[in-house]
Amino acid sequence: MIAKFLSLTFVFALCSGLATAQPDPKPVADKKLVTKLYNIKHLIGERGKASGLADADAVIKVLLETFPQLRDLKPGTDGPQIVERDGNKLAIRTTEEVHGEIKDLLEALERLQDLAVDIKADVIEIDTVAFAKLQKVLAKGNVKPPVLFAMGEEIEDEKKLEAAKKVMEEANKILKAGLVVQTSSGRFLNGAEATISARQSVLTYTNHLETGFRETPLFMKQGFTLVAVPVVSADRRFIRFKLTEQSTVVTGMKKKEFEENGAKIIAQSPVVEDFGATGSAVVADGSTILFRLAYAPKDKVWVVVVKPTIYIRAEEEELNRLRLKRWFDFFLGR
């Protein structure tokens, strides 16, 4: 009896030892939901134009596209939540793990805005005689139409730089005699496609009825859109541009007669011609690109003068800090 007891005790101890020797089970992910407040003011508004985040809705869209855990939101429940609050803030309820990823994403979006390109684009109208003179001045350039001129990497060579400056001075004399149709400016994200200049006129037309006109007129737009993809070089001295014109012109109207509910209708539809071209060039920071638009009024030529400047947020903030320090030093008589 004693021997049997000792034997059972030994087996129990052995089993207990084997049980304690097993590895610990993997920790279960924390599913507890926590609410945290994120200030997104620095991601939208004026700076947001550079990253494509125009408003809080744009930030929310990025969050929903990135995190599947936030795609099933139901206000008033105990599940994940996103609440937009005043002052450009988002209150987000989710797990600590997802909060960590949200923080990383928002910081990455902020870093994208550290480098952008400020672009001013003037559309100048000249006649065909003036354009012929401009072409003659720019004939020695190394670019291909529709890009007419770009002051780029020649700034590395002093002689080439002086020659490019003279060409641009002569070109400016011709362009200044022209008509400035419009001026556009904005800050755009490095490497992202953006519209830097556009002008589209509304053309209306109406379907005819036996009893008169339809109450709501139909319309379409004709004009141009100039789309750019600016890419800043690694040394932040040059910008490579891809420029694409997207233009539409209404060349006429088609008419078709038919009956509807016993009423005779003469339906109209515009005859549209699409044209444009794509060009590329490298331009030095603060220099100029000239781009000829295919779209222009009859017997006129439209040239877009594109002037890009590289925007580095860290440098701008440092300049603002120094200006503020100098103002305080002056005010305090230091």
Image (cartoon, rainbow, N blue to C red):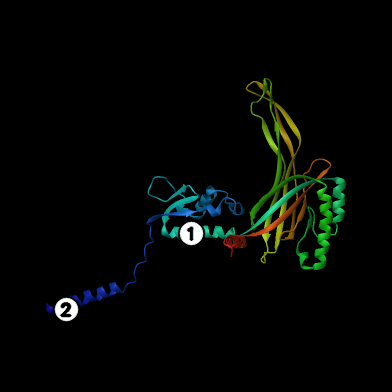
Q: Which of marks 2 and 1 is nearer the N terminus?
A: 2
Residue bearing mark 2: 6
Position of 236 compared to 64: left or right? Answer: right
In this view, the residue in front, 24 or 161, is 161
As measured in the structure, the alpha-carbon distance from the residue carrying label 2 to the one carrying label 1 is 61 Å
Q: Is residue 89 visible?
A: yes
Q: Is residue 14 shown above or below 162?
A: below
Q: What element carries label 2?
A: helix
Which quarter of the figure is the N terminus placed in? Answer: bottom left
Q: Can residue 141 be seen in this view?
A: no
Instruction: Please identify the quarter of the rendering in which residue 160 is found.
Output: bottom right
Residue bearing mark 1: 103
Which quarter of the figure is the C terminus placed in? Answer: bottom right
The amino acid beneath tag 2 is Leu
Q: What element carries label 1?
A: helix
Position of 326 compared to 247: left or right? Answer: left
Residue at the image position 70 percent from the left and 56 percent from the top: 308
In this view, the residue in front, 168 or 272, is 168
Question: Picture coordinates of residue 284 (x, y %)?
Answer: 73, 61
Residue at the image position 25 percent from the left and 73 percent from the top: 16
Q: Is residue 72 shown above or below 267?
A: below
Q: Look at discs 2 and 1 and give the one toward the viewer.
A: 1
Residue at the image position 64 percent from the left and 28 percent from the top: 216
Position of 58 compared to 211: left or right? Answer: left
Category of crowding for the residue at label 2, using alpha-carbon neighbours closer than 10 angstroms: few (below 14), some (14–19), many (at least 20): few
In this view, the residue in front, 278 or 241, is 241
Question: Picture coordinates of residue 100 (x, y %)?
Answer: 46, 60
Residue at the image position 82 percent from the left and 56 percent from the top: 169
Give the residue at the far front of this rendering. Answer: 333
The amino acid beneath tag 1 is Lys
Which numbered circle lies on residue 33? Answer: none
In this view, the residue in front, 53 or 166, is 166
